[in-house]
Amino acid sequence: MKKIIWFMALLPLLYIVYKLGWGFEYSRYISSFIYENGGSFLGRFPHDPLKFTADLLGISAIHFLIATLSITPVRTYLKINLVKYRRLVGLWAFVYAFMHSLFFFIAENEGSISLMYADMLKRPFVFFGVGAFLILAMMAVTSPKKLYAKFVKWHKLVYLATVFIALHYMMSQKVIGLEVAVYVGILAGLLALRLLKR
Amino acid sequence: MYIKRAKAWTLNENSVTDEKIYNDRRTLMRIAAVTGAGAMIPTSLLAAKNYPGMALNFDKNRAFSSLKSSEYDQITTYNNFYEFSLSKDGPSKLAHTLQPEPWTIEITGEVERPMVIDMAEVISKFPLEERIYRFRCVEGWSMVVPWVGFELSYLLKKTGLTSKSKFVQFQTKFDPTMFPEQKEEGFFGNIPFPYVEGLRIDEAMNPLTFLSVGLYGKTLPKQNGAPIRLVVPWKYGFKSIKSITKIHVSSTMTRSTWNEVNPKEYGFYSNVNPDVAHPRWSQAKERPLGSFFKQKTEMFNGYADEVAGLYAGMDLRKNF
């Protein structure tokens, strides 16, 4: 099971490396060696590589957040206990959120903290993104057993982070399309299950 | 003015299949033959390897030939065309339902001679030229496109303008059998259709304002707005409305779809301006397609010499 999680976790990252790899001369050389013609058959460099990378890192973080939040309902309703993997899956949600934030910080804000700060105050969707990331970071730091026992109360903040992430995702769009609606629907459903239980 | 009319048998340089395309096809065929997997190669992949359009006769305009064009594949598979899909690669896969023939353009309103003009007539009547223009999307990416077409002013001079003409409105064809998203009327749907865009009359008559009927020397691919679209190179891309079927000249300010969807984010003018940020992102830089590095966005997308005068005395922060 652990191996499956690691495999799933590394997949988006490998895909990004693979796609961006087409930007380098050597890859064109290798592919032209195989197929005479660069890259067109095996795949190609993304048209908008910065957006491609940021989007894939962000949506992967959402995938892992969904997986993390699903573990309790899966135990309650399907009687399958996966709780011992929750920390690993949750940490991967954090890792992708971290890479997504770092990427945004470097590509959008040129690595300047003051620009990022200004961006955060000016643009609500950045504010929600940063807020969610800080909560996930707190959870990642306090996830080892001993600390977790102390901070378990604080881990309830993941629900707030989920709301923030749903808002962040919706507000970053020009139009709320079906895909976004489905993701937000799943996140809302997972939160609603918590309320139902009470 | 001397206008060269080519004979039916004339082949020009543009009608020669690009060598890379030719080789790509051969490679694909060979792979298909070797692996016996011909049936598994999506037809879209094969289609994408061919220039689908008809060759056009045109002159290269030397005043607009210095930029290096983006790749054909980039221009034709990274599109915003919400009548087909909200995704960038959707239109190139779904636009086959568009029927660019027969096609007419209706010109009405404050014109001296309202008319309905057939596309075939448009292509044969107006002197076509190639102009390589920068194209800057409001979302922050950019490309360079070798358009083929003619100045919008030629068409408006043909219809004549009345003294009350102040604005021009353009409308994309409304036909859900051709544009599948036009029938989606739901909560999570799309922008309202038919798509409309507008220009002030002096913007419309500016020599840069172009009606494009082709790119890379051939008729427009469907996903790029076949058979005829507007190109306003100093404005954000969404002003350059696709698949136009109606042009209405009016005395009052016209509608603009994105302005109606979200007036805080998309103004009527929507001139490319690195100093005026979109509410959610900066417009100071842009991401050229295919590049991992941003470049600076120029005022009026690099066309300030030609168009800055149109906005003299206007506050471009208010009139964004």
Image (cartoon, coloured by chain):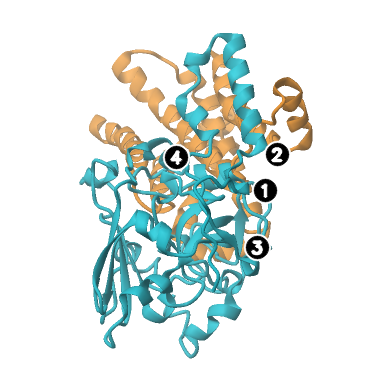
Q: Earlier in the sequence, mark 3 or mark 4?
A: 3
Neighbours of disc 3 within 10 Å: few (<14), some (14-19), many (20+): some
Chain B: its colour in the image is cyan
Tell me which amino acid carries mark 4. Answer: Ser
Q: Which residue is mark 3?
A: B65
The answer to whether the residue labelled 2 contacts the one labelled 1, judged by CB atoms less than 8 Å apart, is: yes
* Cα gap from disc 2 to disc 1, whole angstroms: 9 Å
What residue sits 64% from the left and 38% below the top? A45
* Cα gap from disc 1 to disc 4, whole angstroms: 23 Å
Secondary element type, mark 4: helix
Q: In the rendering, at what x and y percent does residue A80 appear? A: 38, 13
Depth check: B27 or B200 in front?
B27
Secondary element type, mark 3: loop
Which chain is mark 3 on? B
Q: Which residue is mark 4?
A: B92
For the C terminus of chain A, give its image quadrant.
Answer: top left
Q: Earlier in the sequence, mark 1 or mark 4?
A: 4
* Cα gap from disc 2 to disc 4, whole angstroms: 23 Å
Q: Which residue is mark 2?
A: A23
Which chain is mark 4 on? B
Secondary element type, mark 2: loop
Neighbours of disc 4 within 10 Å: few (<14), some (14-19), many (20+): many
Q: Which residue is mark 1?
A: B292
Same chain assignment for discs 2 and 3: no
Q: Report the mark closest to the observer, 3 or 1.
A: 3
Hey, which quadrant is residue A197 in on the image? top left
A32 vs B16, left or right, is right
Q: Report the mark closest to the observer, 2 or 3.
A: 3
Which chain is mark 1 on? B
Depth check: A50 or A74 in front?
A50
Neighbours of disc 2 within 10 Å: few (<14), some (14-19), many (20+): some
* Cα gap from disc 2 to disc 3, whole angstroms: 27 Å
